[in-house]
Image (cartoon, grey):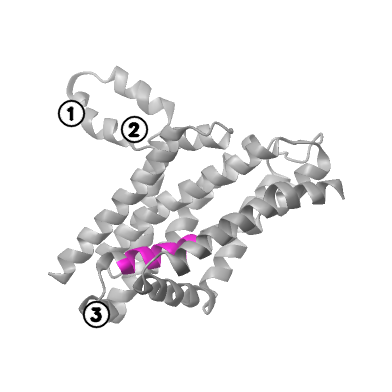
Amino acid sequence: MKALITLLLQFAVPTAIIAAVFVGIVFFVLPREVRTIFKRELRSYFTSPIAYVLFVVFLGISNALSFFFTGVLEGGEADLFLPYFQYLPWYLILIAPAVGMRLWSEEQRLGTMELMLTMPLAPWHAILGKYLAAAVVLFTMLLLSFPIVWTINFLGEPDNGVIMSGFVATFFVALCFLAVTSFVSAMTRSQLVALLISVAVCLVLWLGGLPHISEMLMNLKGAWLIAWPLLKLINAVGVMPHFTELAKGVLGLRDIIFFLTFIAFCLFATSTAIRLKRA
């Protein structure tokens, strides 16, 4: 009972507040055009098997691996970073592109993108509406994984503030991967191509933050120095260090600004790609 009360007070209530703020912004702050696209896109996710299949895959992989292969239950384990959060971005490298691959590719394949671009609709209205709908799908996935938090609270007395930070950091990573996929999807009419390219780019973004990349930059010699600018760029945009800081409960403004700037840049790139197609 104590674990349930803790879960309600420290997780359910903050989550409900965040959801209420999001709903308020969508329906009372954003333009009507964004709301229209948002509702249409969100409906398309939940009236098809896409979202439900991805829910099952994500929850099956993340919870099964955490419970049975990472030792989260051994000895009353109450620290979720090592057995749980450090693996979530690896799953999202595939899951986030799978959610976002249809954002623009499907519109191009069906020929509805041309119709949308001829409507009295600014590109950023459609981009933001579609992106927010896909973000809701990812948020719902993380929300459905909360039973693992109840289990950890039942086993011991963990620092729930750190656990909440882990979910926030994971959601930021998911939003970054989704923003990348939005841009890639705007560049191709094939969902499969969008998925494969997005997975590859997200993998590079994740691995680019490894300490080994920084060490490699320091030790480059001879002809390998030609690759220094590219490796430096990959290392600079690597999301792993920022995720790690947030997931451990260190809510640094620098890390939050990095995520928001990265997302904004990818959405701007999506807008540029759509404007080029419109021209």
Spot occupied by residue 83 in the image (x, y as percentages of width and height): 65, 39
Disc tally is: 3
Q: Can the viewer see residue 159?
A: yes
Q: Earlier in the sequence, mark 1 or mark 2?
A: 1
Query: Label 1's element?
Result: helix
* Side of 59 where 242 appears, left or right: left
Q: Earlier in the sequence, mark 2 or mark 3?
A: 3
Disc 1 marks a residue whose amino acid type is: Ile
> Relative to 120, does residue 66 appear above or below in the rendering?
above
Location of mark 1 (residue): 226
Query: Label 3's element?
Result: loop
Location of mark 3 (residue): 119
For the C terminus, which image quadrant?
bottom left
Q: Which class describes the residues within 10 Å of circle 3: few (<14), some (14-19), or many (20+)?
A: few
Residue 252 covered by magenta stretch: no
Identity of the residue drawn at 85% across and 46% down: 2
Q: Which class describes the residues within 10 Å of circle 1: few (<14), some (14-19), or many (20+)?
A: few
Spot occupied by residue 123 in the image (x, y as percentages of width and height): 26, 67
Query: Label 2's element?
Result: helix
* Side of 232 where 86 appears, left or right: right
Looking at this view, is 146 or 132 the one in front?
A: 132
* Distance between mark 1 and mark 2 Cα atoms: 15 Å
Seen as rendered, the residue at the extreme left is 279
Seen as rendered, the residue at the extreme right is 1
Location of mark 2 (residue): 235
Q: Residue 157, which numbered label?
A: none
Identity of the residue drawn at 51% across and 64% down: 24
- By secondary structure, the bulk of the magenta-drawn segment is best described as helix
* Distance between mark 1 and mark 3 Cα atoms: 47 Å
* Side of 142 where 214 appears, left or right: left
Disc 2 marks a residue whose amino acid type is: Asn
The residue segment tinted magenta is: 125-136
